[in-house]
């Protein structure tokens, strides 16, 4: 890790935020009053990603992890803060050279069944991607490149797969092709947004291993977004835990998984699924409902559900503080 | 006594000249107070099986054969009148998408009350209300929910409402189809705890259909593993999920990531993909993906056989040795 | 593609409306294409047999100028089909583009384009056509263009709704992240995947364009140099009592054509609906 830190980060998030304005109608006695409320989906997220490093981002649905992914690949604009690719602001890069920027940051989506245009064959989708970025000099050459990649990843016979339409392929096959397509461009950063959550358990490992192996082989840095800490721990070097748009804990994967410090991380891990019925588990129960990013109260965002809450937690939100080589945002963990 | 017995149940979909064999000769007993988890991946036919038992399949395009005995009475032979009589009172279902199960223009209290009224026409308004509120209490819902509309509730609350709905007429059999899948882990664990408590209180037997083995591990006494429409293995949960004897179950269990395994040791998976249900292999359906498969597996279908510890498995090599 | 085609063929066989419509269209096309050969007389040729009732020499009788009605109807078929098809195509192109742009780009673009679509929807289009034709004359081409320019609103609404839903699909996000430009996404992914209801609607649009053209001709605003069914009715309306056959047969021809395209459109709609598009 220490040698990674010395190199310049390939991706930097500086205080990245994304707010959504929502119009809510409040009917009062004196007529209709329209009020806008703000949902803070991502709220001041900062981190560095070293070249070749894999960062896991975990949290429950609604914590803003998917929005963060879309902000990094610039499918959405930030409301505040900057995303930097090798020190250059993403907004400038996309204005100057859209294709060049897209080539460097790629994304794998949650739903493989919907990742490809239903009217496109695998060949059309993959060869078209190469052509778009001017890779390879002729269609024949591009076809050969795609064939080779398909063969290498076990989609055999590749020639047969080239002619298929998305609806003729299984979820696992489609997700493989989606990863292959992204990796055809040799990106600097790969963002994978819940890439296995819609797949059967028996084939998830294939997809995770494929992401891990290709990213490691090509030196691609990756952001692996997931709700499942167990899987994330396998693939990630570091893990960031998000709650209500904020990073609450960030550190080495094993530190986070085996010795969580933030109460929310502790609760998340204690609720982690297991298939061994004999296992005695101490599940930390969380009070209240899962979070909504609208009208977040003052103080620590997690305070209303926190089992270790103190009165001071409701007054002031703590900053991320470094403890034992990791960042934690919590008063109780520090004391 | 078995509360529900499936005898040789098969389901075939007919579409555009093709026959899709979604369920093949499944026999299964659900004993009273022994919650059963039916585990299967996509295409395993777990939902089809339950739809067949509930008689919710389109009879024009589906053939259902075999017997499904609910307390000794064959559901497949029931008249429509008898069927609507036993729905909700004998067997109830909770679906994955709770929002779809409720009416958007009625308050949840009114909607559930109406179900009660259909089966108990003599009930007074006050009586219905108190029954509904009691049921809400059972699933940890506040009384004020009665007057709310479905869109005003969170996902966890909605799922509790649909569980309350299924309990309103005291069914003896409760079927849950991926009922906790859409929820986050924290809420899921809470609801599973509540259900287990309820079962003991009210003597309900539950069938839990899910793709998630951890749900079965934490909430079911028995488990049945489905693959490509056939039953692979069944038995007590703490045996099947800990020491599986069928290669498919073994593969599934190994694929499940656990905290104990060392980091970055390559994850395991089952190679290959599901067979074409319209064109099933002649032998064992799992043979093409099975690490232990030999000639016999490709040529003849293994029967479900008994194994020590009240377990069953359909494999020639179950438990490590060749039994043929 | 092949598989899709197979599915399409199967859907066709199961769709009576489409089959009947197709046979009716074939008959209509045959008549329009071979009007010259099929017609017993030259439809423009005047004769002394004025207002002859249907007989063996004139199967559908003649009009007030002694022209053979059957031949006129045959030639009119050509005009009606041409007007209907071209106007409907113009409407389809305009509607698809405006609706696609409004729905896909959203935000301010949608406010402007969507607003424009809504304003146009409230416009009494037939009177608009009347004004335009009255101002600029009533040549065949002008009539076609005017009908096309005023009947795209339905298509635009459909395409906008399609674009709004398709743009949220993962494959659109994935195309964007791969680096495809917005315009390319609109033309390569949004429009081709959302075009099916517009195809169905356009087929029905042919029917309504034919009706509009007939109405124009009936009001005396059609192209006077060309025989069209509307015009035949306009001529014949003065002879409803003495020569009923003129209006009746021309009216039947219009009804036949409108039903043809309605059946086709409805059939296409059923075939292309989720059944075929589903995975």
Image: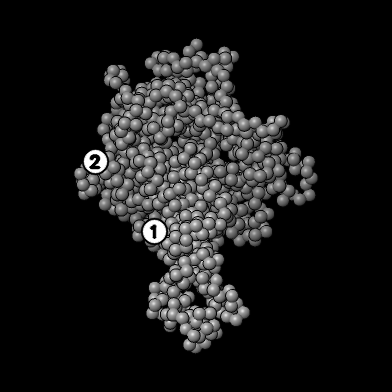
Q: Position of residue C143 (x, y in %)?
A: 46, 61
**Proximity of marks 2 and 1: CB atoms separated by less than 8 Å:** no
Label 1 is found on which chain of the structure?
A: C
Q: In the image, is B82 to the left or to the right of C250?
A: right
The secondary element bearing badge 1 is classed as helix
Res A94 → quadrant: top left
In percent of the image, x 59 and y 14: which residue is there? A311
What residue sits 56% from the left and 79% below the top?
Answer: C245
Q: Is residue B72 above or below residue A182?
A: below
Q: Is residue B302 shown left or right of residue B122?
A: left
Q: Nearer the viewer, residue C26 or C13?
A: C26
Residue C6 in view of the camera: yes
Viewed as shown, does residue B10 lie left or right of A48?
right
For mark 2, give the secondary structure.
loop
Residue at which label 1 appears: C4
| Badge 2: chain ID | A
Q: Residue at x 35, y 50 (%)?
A: A120
Q: Vertical placement of B155 versus B229: above or below?
A: above
Residue A118, percent from left and from top: 39, 50
For label 1, count other residues whose C-alpha is less than 10 Å away and answer few (under 14), some (14-19) or many (20+): few
Horizontal and vertical percent for residue C138? 47, 63
Q: Residue furthest bottom?
A: C56
Q: How many numbered tags mark residues here?
A: 2
Vertical comparison of A303 with A203: above or below: above
Residue shown at 53%/59% (left/top)? C130
Mark 2 or 1: in front is 2
Give the side of residue A116 with respect to residue A307, left or right. left
- Nearer the observer, C87 or A328: C87
Measured from the top left, where is residue A85 in percent x and y?
33, 26
**Which residue does the numbered mark 2 point to in the structure image?**
A135
């Amino acid at each position: 890790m220490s040698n990674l830190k010395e190199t310049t980060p390939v991706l930097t998030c500086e205080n990245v935020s994304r707010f959504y304005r929502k119009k809510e109608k409040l009917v009062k006695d004196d007529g209709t009053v329209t009020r806008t409320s703000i949902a803070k989906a991502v709220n001041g997220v900062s981190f560095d990603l070293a070249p070749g490093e894999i960062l896991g981002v975990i949290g429950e649905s609604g914590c803003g992890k998917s929005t963060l992914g879309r902000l990094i690949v610039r499918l959405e604009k930030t409301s505040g803060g900057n995303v930097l690719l090798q020190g250059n602001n993403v907004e400038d890069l996309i204005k100057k050279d859209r294709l060049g920027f897209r080539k460097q940051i790629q994304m794998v989506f949650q739903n493989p069944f919907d990742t490809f245009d239903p009217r496109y064959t695998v060949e059309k989708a993959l060869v078209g991607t190469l052509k778009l970025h001017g890779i390879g000099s002729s269609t024949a050459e591009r076809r050969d490149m795609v064939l080779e990649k398909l063969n290498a990843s076990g989609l055999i016979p590749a020639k047969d797969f080239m002619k298929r339409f998305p609806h003729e392929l299984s979820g696992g096959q489609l997700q493989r092709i989606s990863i292959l397509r992204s990796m055809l461009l040799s990106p600097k950063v790969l963002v994978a947004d819940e890439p296995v959550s819609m797949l059967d358990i028996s084939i998830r490992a294939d997809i995770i291993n494929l992401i891990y192996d290709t990213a490691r082989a090509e030196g691609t840095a990756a952001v692996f977004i997931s709700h499942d800490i167990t899987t994330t721990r396998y693939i990630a070097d570091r893990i960031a835990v998000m709650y209500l748009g904020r990073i609450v804990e960030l550190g080495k994967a094993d530190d986070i998984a085996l010795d969580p410090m933030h109460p929310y991380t502790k609760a998340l891990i204690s609720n982690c699924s297991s298939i061994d019925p004999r296992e005695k588990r101490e599940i930390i129960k969380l009070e209240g409902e899962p979070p909504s990013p609208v009208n977040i109260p003052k103080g620590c965002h997690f305070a209303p559900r926190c089992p270790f809450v103190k009165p001071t937690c409701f007054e002031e939100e703590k900053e991320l503080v470094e403890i034992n080589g990791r960042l934690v945002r919590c008063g109780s963990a520090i004391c | 006594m078995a509360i529900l017995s499936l005898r040789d149940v098969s389901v075939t979909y007919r579409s555009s000249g093709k026959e899709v064999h979604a369920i093949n000769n499944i026999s299964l007993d659900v004993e009273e107070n022994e919650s059963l988890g039916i585990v299967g991946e996509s295409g395993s036919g777990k939902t089809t099986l339950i739809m067949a038992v509930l008689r919710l399949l389109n009879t024009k395009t589906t053939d259902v054969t075999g017997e499904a005995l609910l307390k000794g009475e064959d559901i497949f032979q029931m008249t429509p009148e008898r069927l609507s009589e036993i729905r909700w009172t004998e067997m109830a279902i909770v679906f994955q998408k709770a929002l779809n199960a409720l009416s958007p223009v009625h308050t949840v209290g009114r909607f559930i009350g109406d179900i009660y009224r259909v089966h108990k026409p003599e009930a007074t308004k006050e009586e219905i209300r108190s029954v509904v509120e009691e049921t809400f209490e059972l699933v940890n819902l506040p009384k004020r929910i009665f007057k709310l509309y479905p869109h005003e509730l969170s996902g966890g609350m909605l799922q509790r409402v649909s569980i309350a709905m299924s309990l309103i007429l005291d069914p003896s059999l409760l079927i849950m189809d991926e009922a906790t899948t859409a929820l986050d882990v924290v809420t899921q664990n809470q609801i599973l705890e509540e259900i287990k408590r309820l079962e003991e209180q009210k003597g309900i037997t539950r069938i839990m259909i899910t793709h998630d083995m951890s749900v079965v591990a934490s909430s079911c006494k028995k488990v049945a593993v489905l693959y490509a429409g056939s039953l692979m293995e069944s038995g007590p949960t703490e045996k099947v999920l800990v020491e599986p004897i069928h290669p498919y179950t073994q593969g599934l269990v190994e694929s499940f990531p656990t905290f104990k395994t060392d980091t970055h040791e390559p994850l395991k998976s089952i190679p290959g993909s599901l067979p074409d249900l319209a064109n099933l292999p002649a032998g064992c359906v799992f043979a093409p993906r099975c690490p232990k498969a030999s000639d016999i597996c490709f040529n003849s279908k293994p029967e479900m056989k008994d194994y020590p510890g009240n377990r069953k498995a359909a494999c020639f090599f179950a438990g490590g040795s060749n039994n043929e | 593609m092949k598989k899709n085609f197979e599915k399409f063929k199967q859907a066709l066989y199961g769709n009576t409306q489409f089959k009947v419509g197709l046979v009716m269209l074939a008959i209509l096309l045959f008549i329009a294409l071979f009007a010259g050969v099929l017609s017993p007389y030259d439809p423009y040729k005047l004769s002394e047999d004025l207002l002859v009732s249907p007989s063996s020499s004139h199967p559908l009788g003649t009009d007030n100028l002694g022209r053979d009605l059957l031949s006129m109807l045959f030639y009119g078929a050509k005009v009606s089909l041409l007007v209907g098809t071209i106007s409907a195509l113009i409407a389809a192109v305009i509607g698809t583009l405006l609706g696609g742009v409004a729905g896909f780009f959203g935000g301010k673009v949608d406010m402007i384009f969507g607003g424009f679509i809504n304003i146009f929807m409230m416009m009494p289009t037939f009177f608009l056509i009347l004004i335009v034709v009255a101002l600029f004359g009533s040549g065949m081409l002008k009539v076609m263009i005017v009908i096309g320019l005023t009947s795209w609103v339905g298509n635009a609404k459909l395409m906008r709704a399609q674009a709004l839903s398709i743009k949220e699909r993962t494959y659109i996000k994935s195309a964007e992240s791969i680096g495809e430009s917005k315009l390319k996404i609109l033309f390569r992914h949004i429009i081709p995947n959302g075009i099916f209801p517009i195809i169905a609607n356009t087929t029905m649009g042919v029917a309504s364009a034919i009706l509009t053209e007939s109405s124009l001709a009936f009001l005396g605003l059609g192209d006077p140099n060309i025989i069209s069914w509307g015009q035949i009715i306009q001529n014949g309306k003065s002879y409803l009592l003495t020569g009923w056959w003129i209006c009746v047969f021309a009216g039947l021809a219009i009804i036949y054509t409108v039903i043809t395209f309605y059946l086709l459109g409805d059939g296409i709609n059923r075939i292309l609906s989720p059944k075929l598009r589903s995975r």
